[in-house]
Image: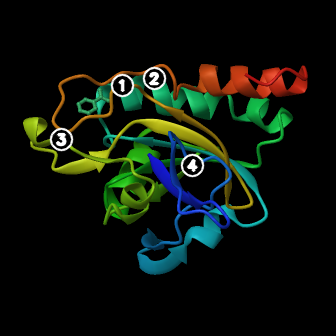
Amino acid sequence: TKFKYVEGEGSKTTILIMFDDKINMQVPHVHFRVREMGEWVDTNTDTYFKDKRVIVFSLPGAFTPTCSNQQLPGYELKADVFKEHGIDQIYCMSVNDSFVMNAWAQDQKLENVKVIPDGNGQFTQEMGMLCQKRDKCFGERSWRYAMIVNNGVIEKMFVEPGKTDDTPEDPYGESSPENVLKYLQSLNQGNSI
Ligand code: BEZ
């Protein structure tokens, strides 16, 4: 949730506006370290977002069932359709280290979706999407969400309902490739949802 204070000119009134998402805000500027060809490579937000319109979907953990069987393969399979709708790149983010994310990408035989290891959880935290999953002994992870980001500016968010710490619930639908595609198709038809 985003809060904004608006002070009226010449008045003592302060209005507190609450935003439920971060539309039109910049994504957090964060440093990442990734393993490529056996070496550490430093990347940052610009590496992934500058001058591109991208989808990011962020999920609770590499190799977990819903993520591995539905969400990630769904985005991978639909990559060409997303491209036709003006998406330059699709990223899968998780609060996991780069070794784990690379192993998962290899296991899933990814050719289209690229992984971003938010190992420190900093990007996820600054997005307001970090949550506790202590009930599963996962520690801090990402709440499941997706977003469309245009040159670093958030165009649309798809957040699963009920974001709570240590919940056994793991809703999946809002951030699915089918739902994100439905939104993009509605833009092409000129009736944004
Ligand atoms: C999943 O199925 O994606 C999942 C399972 C346990 C914890 C988090 C995610």
| Residue for badge 1 | 66
> On the rendered structure, is 163 left or right of 138?
right
- Disc 4 crowd, CA 10 A, few/some/many (<14, 14-19, 20+): some
Q: Secondary structure at mark 3?
A: loop
Residue beneath the point at 80% across and 21% down: 186
The residues tagged by marks 4 and 2 sit, at their Cα atoms, a distance apart of 26 Å
Tell me whether the residue at label 3 lies in contact with that at label 1, contact meaning CB atoms closer than 8 angstroms: no
Q: Secondary structure at mark 4?
A: loop
Residue beneath the point at 74% across and 60% down: 151
Q: In this orientation, which residue lies closer to the viewer: 147 or 19?
A: 19
Q: What's the amino acid at mark 3?
A: Lys
- Quadrant hosting residue 193: top right
The residues tagged by marks 1 and 2 sit, at their Cα atoms, a distance apart of 5 Å
> On the rendered structure, is 38 left or right of 23?
left
The residues tagged by marks 2 and 3 sit, at their Cα atoms, a distance apart of 20 Å
Say if disc 3 is inside 8 Å of ligand 1: yes
| Residue for badge 3 | 133
Of tags 3 and 1, the one toward the viewer is 3
Residue beneath the point at 39% across and 31% down: 67
Q: Secondary structure at mark 1?
A: helix
| Residue for badge 4 | 22
Residue 113 percent coordinates (x, y): 59, 45
